[in-house]
Amino acid sequence: MAPVARRPGLIFFVHWILASLISAIFLGVYELCSKHAVRENAVLPVLFFSTLTGAAVWTFLLVVDFIVPGALPSSFVTQSLTAHQHLQLALKSAIVTGSWIFTYFALKQLPLSIASPIRATGPLFTLFGAILILAERPSILEMIGILTTLASFAGLSIVGRREGVHFHRNKWVGFILGGTLLGAISALYDKYLLGKGGFTVPTVQAWFSIYLLVFFVPFMIGWQRRWWDRKQFHWRWSIPAIALALLVADYIYFGALRNPDSLVSVVMSLRRGSTLVAFAGSVWLFRESNGRQKLPAVIGILVGIALTIFG
């Protein structure tokens, strides 16, 4: 039987630099929706219903491809997997589950104008992992980038004190750092899955989304049965928007990486522009204070991350 012809994904026709910028915008929207969803709200139901949305989208695509082969673009089609490969993707979902629990509880308590720049330091954690695990040596640019990021981070902490956020003793800062660290571990694992692991992008996205929902089910059951003290849950439009914005951001991002002319360092650097979107939205929509005082530190963190990536 002849192989089923597949249409290329829509992102194939978009220039990779433009795609990276569009991805950054949607990633910033994702952070704004996350903050809107968890403000004065129970965190675990927000995570459950947003992951349910993402899993539902990919389950629908899997069913469509099974019933009507060739109906979907190649960028939406998954590969067949062994039991061992399913376990590998389940491990990624477990890592992200931990990362999101830490991150979302921190987002509820911290101003987004502080939390988002901290989350942007993920590539810094990835570099530290490469140095410690892979015995890589940082270049001069990378060292300058690290020092710039750390100095800007210190500046942000000084401004944060005016809002009662003391970085060295605030547990929610520890939570956001823990979530960012787990996110960096997930990024390193992604490189393995998409490289040596031989997984395709839609396969990772689809089964990651489905297994993520599986991991959040016990937390949702515990919340519903009041196994611990909990907040009241309020449904908001931003809850499904979290998943949809992240799906679009990741799809466009991976589409940019698939372009043979794209430069990974440039794509990753442009993607960090999401922090500016989230920062501007937090000041404009959520009326967070000290925006002008935080802006130099935010820009400094982005410059440091860019130097680290280009190094």
Image (cartoon, rainbow, N blue to C red):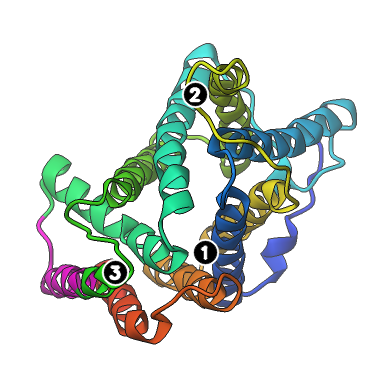
Q: Which residue lies furthest to the right in this view?
A: 68
The first of marks 2 and 3 along the sequence is 2
Which quadrant of the figure has residue 233?
top right
Residue that badge 3 annotates: 160
Disc 2 from disc 1: Cα separation: 29 Å
Of helix, strand and loop, which one carries label 3?
Answer: helix
Which quadrant of the figure has residue 209?
top right
Q: Which residue is rendered at x = 31% and y = 61% of the image?
A: 121
Picture layout, residue 88 above or below residue 51? above
- Determine contact: label 3, label 1, CB under 8 Å: no
Residue that badge 2 annotates: 90
Q: Which residue is rendered at x = 55% and y = 16% of the image?
A: 82
Q: Where is residue 141 in the image (x, y as percent from the top left)?
A: 17, 75
Binning the other alpha carbons within 10 Å of mark 2 as few (below 14), some (14 to 19) or many (20 upward) gives many
Toward the viewer: 216 or 132?
216
Q: Position of residue 95 (x, y in %)?
A: 40, 32
Which quadrant of the figure has residue 256?
bottom right
Q: Magenta region: which residues? A: 137-154
Q: In which quarter of the image is the N terminus?
A: top right
Q: Where is residue 224 in the image (x, y as percent from the top left)?
A: 63, 20
Residue that badge 1 annotates: 260
Q: Which amino acid does label 1 sit on?
A: Pro
- Asked whether, in this view, residue 25 is left or right of residue 292, the answer is right
